[in-house]
Image (cartoon, rainbow, N blue to C red):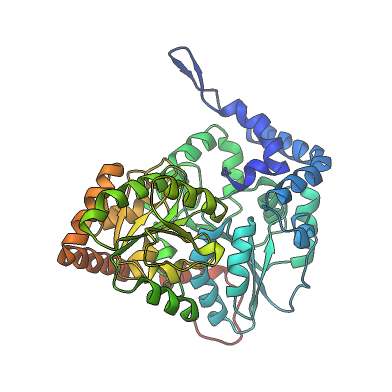
Amino acid sequence: MRDGYATTTALHLAARHFHAHFRDRVDGDRTIRPQALDGAMFYRLYRGLTTLAGPLVPVLLDRRQAADKEDPGRRGERLGVPSHPRPPGRLAWLHAASVGEALSVQVLVGRLLAHDADLRILLTTGTVTSARLIGGRLPARAVHQYIPVDRMAYVRRFLDHWRPDLVLWVESELWPNLLTEIARRGIPAAIVNARLSARTFARWRRLPGMIRTLLATFATVLPWDDESAARFRALGAAAIGPVGNLKFSADPPAADAAALAPLRGAVGDRPVWLAASTHDGEEALCAAAHQALAPALPGLLTVIVPRHPARGPAIADMATTRGLAAARRGAGALPAADTAVYVADTMGEMGTLLRLAPIVFVGGSLVPHGGHNPVEPVQLDSAVLYGPHMTNFSEITAQLAAADAALQVADGDGLTAALRRLFTDPAERDRLAAAAAAVAARNRGVVDAVMATLRPLLPPARTGEAA
């Protein structure tokens, strides 16, 4: 199981009590590693605790709602109560934890629907952000719902209603009650774009019986890199990959033409770069880079797209405190002639914003967050920079590094130096962008390999193209 969404749910509140039993502890200079726990005992504890946590679920959902992490109009979905009727015919259920996973799976949704003209898609996610972003992008035969909290009563209510013919898990968010019930009902299932970090692998190794049982739910596991493939095999999965990363097969993020035109008009021919999906601590480094570069680059515009738009006002205040004129897209502003830092604190506009900048820094990488998806700027012909913390996308960055198709920087000074290099050497900027585009092009066929592997699990198609 992963952190993030789970950390504030009733599930995690229950799970954290026994996670402590298999986490490394430090005693002085010694690291104490507990022995592996019996899988059946672990699951009995898990199911019992999540059952007992039932009265806490409304309380924690209230807290999440107050923090804009729950949708009050769709709260029943978190309890397994559907907001839509089950469509007739065959139904494939895809679960994608959050925004990145949901975006990466859109190309697979399209291929599944093309494979079978009678198939319907249920896409679940666990975050408000993903629901807001994905809900309006789904095709006519697909519907979005929130994943229920992993309590057996909610799980069974959800599955009783939707009765999926196929389950596809995206990446590797493992919910024991959900997976156990899927297996009990004999629903064909697979993990696609499966990623397993070293940290999660180490924890699951201490519960070999349970993880083997959970992974046995899946007829096929399609890892996205060699390291994940080896880890899944070591845990007992039927891993057949690596197949590759679906993010390469995804279409470039769309742009809103009506929004892009006034942005381009406001920016004009100014030198511009964009910092995408930044986290706390990175925006100050971006502002410092701007200050260092601006004397030699008249009119320089730095566009900052924070991962969490609610931080927009604080980022603008930081820039202003440093003496940089700032404007916020979330407040309805366009960059003015004197705007130095443009904070794009809105949702669902990355495709529009990326089209402004020939140079893009990928956030979450100068702080130990693990980085964000570098494929999107690559697809839009930008020269890409990122910091040392790209563990979430190590397979992609390894390919970019092997092709000399991106620049990795160590810190804020490195970011400034790399930006100066690319602004003053357009030929190098174009070379990087072209090399990265070639890497992306080589990987576009990942979705074809995924569809070929999933063919035996797909409900028989009556009409439509072959997979």
* Residue 438 point in image, percent of width and height: 26, 69
- The answer to whether residue 306 of the structure is visible from this angle is yes
Residue projecting furthest to the bottom? 463
Residue projecting furthest to the top? 28
* Residue 359 point in image, percent of width and height: 30, 62
State the residue at coordinates (73%, 49%).
66
* Residue 229 point in image, percent of width and height: 41, 50
Q: Which of 219 and 61 is in front in this view?
A: 61
State the residue at coordinates (73%, 51%).
65
Residue projecting furthest to the right? 55
**Which quadrant: the N terminus?**
top right
Q: Is residue 456 left or right of residue 413?
A: right
State the residue at coordinates (36%, 49%).
287
Q: In this view, does 211 lie to the left or right of 64?
A: left
In the depicted structure, whether residue 207 falls above or below residue 241: above
* Residue 43 quadrant: top right
In the depicted structure, whether residue 85 falls above or below residue 209: below
* Number of numbered discs overlaid on the protein picture: 0
- The answer to whether residue 404 of the structure is visible from this angle is no
Q: In this view, does 25 lie to the left or right of 152?
A: left
Q: In this view, does 133 lie to the left or right of 198?
A: right
Q: Nearer the viewer, residue 121 or 404?
A: 404
* Residue 220 point in image, percent of width and height: 52, 58
* Residue 322 quadrant: top left
